[in-house]
């Protein structure tokens, strides 16, 4: 289970309809609704500044939250829609869906790297590039992995780690069907520059040989 599921604090909204929603916005709140999970829909208000800060962090719709509303039991939710002002692009309403433990959801799971310091390619000066420091997986709400791991043991410069080489937790699978790269070990910039110069030198030498042969034949 993931170690940290962020709390999302809200208050129950008294009254429904456009009038109550407009009043919430005047009070510095963003109206929303929590639905699903075999329970009645719950109208809520969220502090505007807190919500905006979370939206700016990104991946709001793929983050599992622990919804805390005074007078109600905590419930796990995921955002299903954020309505925005068409001019200011600021949030005006948010829809959340309650999740059962068996619900399937898409979440970004962080990648942990093992044996980076002992990898032969790193010891030779190679540079580790994390193409995907997080991987989006389809997981079960009641069994969310805290992380997935990649092992660099034995990897040389030029080697890559793809999703097919990762042991995923039971019940989890990538949202992308193809075998994509998570990380690679590339040559250091100085070595790459030297190799490029060497290649250019070989091309120039080959061109000179070809020109000499053509002159001799002429």
Image: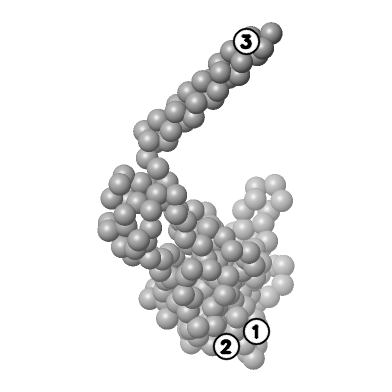
The image quarter containing residue 14 is: bottom right
Disc 1: CA contacts within 10 A as few (<14), some (14-19) or many (>=20): some
- Disc 1 secondary structure class: loop
Cβ–Cβ under 8 Å for marks 1 and 2: no
148 relative to 133, above or below: below
> Percent x, y for residue 128?
39, 51
Name the front one of labels 1 and 3.
Answer: 3
Name the front one of labels 1 and 2.
Answer: 2
Disc 2: CA contacts within 10 A as few (<14), some (14-19) or many (>=20): few
The image quarter containing residue 97 is: bottom right
- Disc 2 secondary structure class: loop
Q: Nearer the viewer, residue 20 or 198?
A: 198
Instruction: Identify the residue at image location x=52%, y=54%.
Output: 56
> Percent x, y for residue 217?
67, 12
The mark found on residue 132 in the picture is none
Cβ–Cβ under 8 Å for marks 1 and 3: no
Disc 3: CA contacts within 10 A as few (<14), some (14-19) or many (>=20): few
What residue does disc 2 label? 102
Mark 3 and mark 2 lie on one chain; the one further toward the N terminus is 2
> Percent x, y for residue 42?
61, 81
Q: Gap between marks 3 and 2, in whole Å?
A: 79 Å
Instruction: Identify the residue at image location x=40%, y=69%.
Output: 149
The mark found on residue 216 in the picture is 3
Instruction: Identify the residue at image location x=35%, y=51%.
Output: 121
Name the front one of labels 3 and 2.
Answer: 3
Mark 1 and mark 3 lie on one chain; the one further toward the N terminus is 1
Instruction: Identify the residue at image location x=42%, y=46%.
Output: 186
Which color scheme does this rendered protein use? one colour
96 relative to 151, above or below: below
What residue does disc 1 label? 36
């Amino acid at each position: 289970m993931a170690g940290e599921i962020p709390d999302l604090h809200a208050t129950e909204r008294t009254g429904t309809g456009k009038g109550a929603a407009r009043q919430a916005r005047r009070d510095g709140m963003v109206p929303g609704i929590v639905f699903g999970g075999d329970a009645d829909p719950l109208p809520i208000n969220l502090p505007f500044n807190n919500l905006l800060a979370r939206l700016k962090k990104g991946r709001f719709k793929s983050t599992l939250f622990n919804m805390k509303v005074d007078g109600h039991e905590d419930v796990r939710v995921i955002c299903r829609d954020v309505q925005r002002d068409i001019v200011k692009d600021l949030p005006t309403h948010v829809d959340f869906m309650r999740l059962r433990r068996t619900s399937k959801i898409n979440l970004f799971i962080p990648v942990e790297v093992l044996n980076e310091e002992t990898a032969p390619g790193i010891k030779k000066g190679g540079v580790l590039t994390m193409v995907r420091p997080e991987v989006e997986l389809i997981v079960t709400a009641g069994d969310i992995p805290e992380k997935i791991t990649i092992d660099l043991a034995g990897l040389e410069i030029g080697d890559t780690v793809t999703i097919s080489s990762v042991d995923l937790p039971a019940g989890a699978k990538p949202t992308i069907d193809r075998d994509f790269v998570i990380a690679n070990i590339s040559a250091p910039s100085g070595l790459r520059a030297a190799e490029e110069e060497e290649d250019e030198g070989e091309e120039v030498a080959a061109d000179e040989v070809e020109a000499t042969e053509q002159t001799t034949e002429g």
